[in-house]
Amino acid sequence: MQSLKFFALKTLVFASFFSLKAQEKPVKIISEKLTEDLYMLTGQGGNIGIYIGPDNTFMIDDQFSHLSDQIKETIKTLSPKPISVLFNTHMHGDHTGGNANFNTDEITLISQDNARKRVQENNLKKLNSQEIDSIYYHKMLPEITFSNDLTLHKGEETILAFHVHKAHTDGDAMVYFAQNNVLHMGDTYFSEGYPFIDLKSGGSVNGYIDSHKKALVLIDNETKIIPGHGKSSTKKELETYVLMLEDIKENVLKAIRSGATLEEVETDTSISKKYDANYGGGFISPERLRATFYTSLK
C-alpha cells in the first residue's frame, strides 16, 4: 500500500513540475501542413489539429491558457476563416487549458461526456478556491457532449469523432477527417515516447492498447496521424508502437504471475529494455511505465 501511495505522489509531483517548466520556457507555435486543409500545431502541451473548412475553421485541443494569443495568431496565418468548433480530445490541462480563452458566442466546444465531467471537476476546485471566477469556470466547459460517436459535416468533409474506452483517461475521443484521411488520436498516442496512461482518471493499459487497434481498423497506409505528443505519424509507426506495448504488457503479466511486487517490476529493466532506447527518453521514464503497467494489470 505504501508503494502505491508513493507512486501516486510521484505522479502528482512530476505532473506539477512539468506544468511549471512548460510555463517558464519561451514558446514558439509551429505549424505543419499535413494536407491542403489540415495542419498540426506544436508548442507546449498537446498537439493541436486545425482543419480549414469552406467557411470556417475546426480546431482540436488548445494547449495551455497562456499560449492562447500565440495560437490564435498562428491560426490566422493559416486562414482568415473564423474558428467555429473547438474539440477537446480529453480533459487534461495541456489540451483544454485555453478553453475559456477560445469559448465565445461564435465557437462551440465539444467533448466526450466523461471529458466534460472531469474538466468540470477540476475547474470547480479552482472556483471554490477562488483561483477563477464563475464566468471563467463556465467558459471552460464543453457545451456539446456525446457518449460514443459523433459525426459532423463541413462542406465535402465528414468528421468522425469516436470514444475509446478507458484508454489514456475515461473520456478520450479520436477525430477522423475522412476526405483528408487524417486522424487526431489525442493522448491515446505518444509517437516518440512511452505513453502516459492516467490510471487515476480512468485510463488503463488494456484500454490504451485496444484504442490503437480500433484506430488501425479505421486507417490505411496513406493516413496521416496527429498524436497527442510527438511528431506526426503513420499507420506503420502505430503498428510498431502497438507491438511494443503488447510485448511489455506480456512481460509485466509474467512478472505478476511469478509473484513480483510493484517495486520489483519498477526496477526490473529487462521488462522494457528492448524498447527503452527508442521510447524511454520522453515524459514517461521506463521505470514509471513499468509501474503503470503493473498497477493497471494487477
Image (cartoon, rainbow, N blue to C red):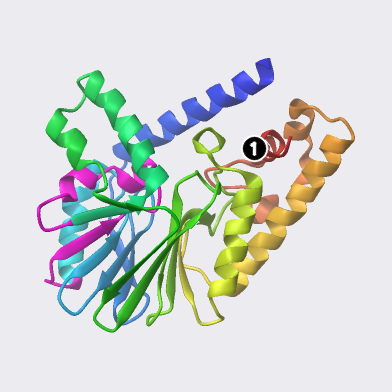
* Residue corresponding to mark 1: 292
Extreme residue in the top direction: 2
Residue 128 drawn at (x, y percent)? 24, 20
Please say whether residue 273 is visible from this viewpoint.
Answer: no
Residue at image position (59%, 51%) is: 208
Please say whether residue 31 is visible from this viewpoint.
Answer: yes
How many numbered discs sit on the rendered protein? 1
Q: Is residue 104 magenta?
A: yes
Residue at image position (56%, 36%) is: 199
Q: Is residue 67 left or right of residue 281?
A: left
Q: Which residues are magenta?
A: 78-107
Residue type at the position of mark 1: Thr
Residue at image position (74%, 34%) is: 298
Residue 105 drawn at (x, y percent)? 9, 53
Which of the 4 image quadrants contains residue 91? top left
Residue 207 drawn at (x, y percent)? 61, 50
Q: Is residue 169 magenta?
A: no
Quarter of the N terminus within the rendering: top right
Of 73 and 131, the residue lying toward us: 131
Q: Is residue 227 left or right of residue 209?
A: left
Residue 136 drawn at (x, y percent)? 16, 35
Q: Of helix, strand and loop, which one carries label 1?
A: helix
